[in-house]
Every structure is written in structure tokens, then in C-alpha cells.
Image: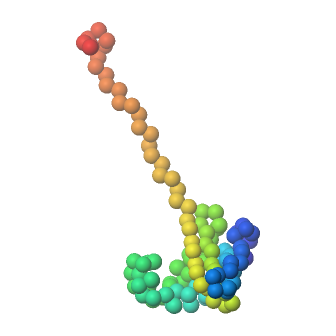
Amino acid sequence: MDGGAPAHWTTDVILSDGATLHVRPITPEDAPRLVVFHSKLSSASQYMRFFTAKPRLREAELKRFSTFDHEARGALVAEGGDALYSVRACQRVQPVRHTPRLPRLLARGPPSKCRG
């Protein structure tokens, strides 16, 4: 497990058929298994994830999808034996910073010239 990932992100889950999967944070060492996992996705599933045909992941994509800081970005894999069965990632979205609106002040001139 990556040294920066919280220990409580690792667990075993029992599926309805009795099989067990190990869930843990992804690490850069998972890149080769991520290639195999991606190659088994249907073209429709690949399209839904990347909005284009994506038969192979580029090296830069593999690095991005397997390297996380576990604070702003994180990902978990579910593995059984040597295979990955699921990959889930999340990324912190920074709040949109709005410029505060100042109230509009209308100057009408000196109070003596204002009529109501």
C-alpha cells in the first residue's frame, strides 16, 4: 500500500456469491494490471469513461490513473488474485471563489438637492 493512504481505506469485502475481494488504494505498481483491466472493458464502456474510443491507455494516462496524493485525489481498486475487478477514483473539487458583490450606491448629489 502507498505510504500516504489512510489505513482504513483497506478492507476485504464478501460478495453475494461468497467470493472475497480486497479493496485498497491504487499504487503505481498497479499500472500493468490497469492496462489489462482497461483492455477488458467493452468499447461502449471505454467511450462512457473517456467520451471517445480508447483501446489503449497512454503512458501519461497510466501514471495519472495510478498515482495519487490521497488528499486532493484518491482511488481504490478491488482485486481478487492477480486481477483488478473495479477501479474508483475521486478528486476534490475546489470551491468556486466568487468576487463579493458590493452594494450599489447611487450618488444623487448633496442632500439639499435630493427630493425624496
- Residue lying at 61% horizontally and 72% vertically, measured from the top left: 75
Give above or below for 73 relative to 100.
below
The residue drawn where x is 39% and y is 81% is: 52
Residue 100 figure quarter: top left
Foreground residue, 102 or 109?
102
Quarter location, residue 69: bottom right
The extreme top residue here reads: 112
As drawn, is 72 to the left or to the right of 95? right
Where residue 14 sits: x, y (%)? 68, 80
The residue lying toward the viewer, choosing from 110 and 66, is: 66
- The spot of residue 68 in percent (x, y) is 62, 71
Q: Nearer the viewer, residue 104 or 86?
A: 86
Residue 102, how many percent across, how many down? 41, 34
Residue 105 appears in view: yes
Q: What coloring was used for the rendering?
A: rainbow
Confirm whether residue 29 shows in the render: no
> Which residue appears at 50% of the width and 84% of the height?
58
**Residue 77's image quarter?**
bottom right
Which residue lies at the image location 56% right of the left edge and 90% below the top edge?
Answer: 36
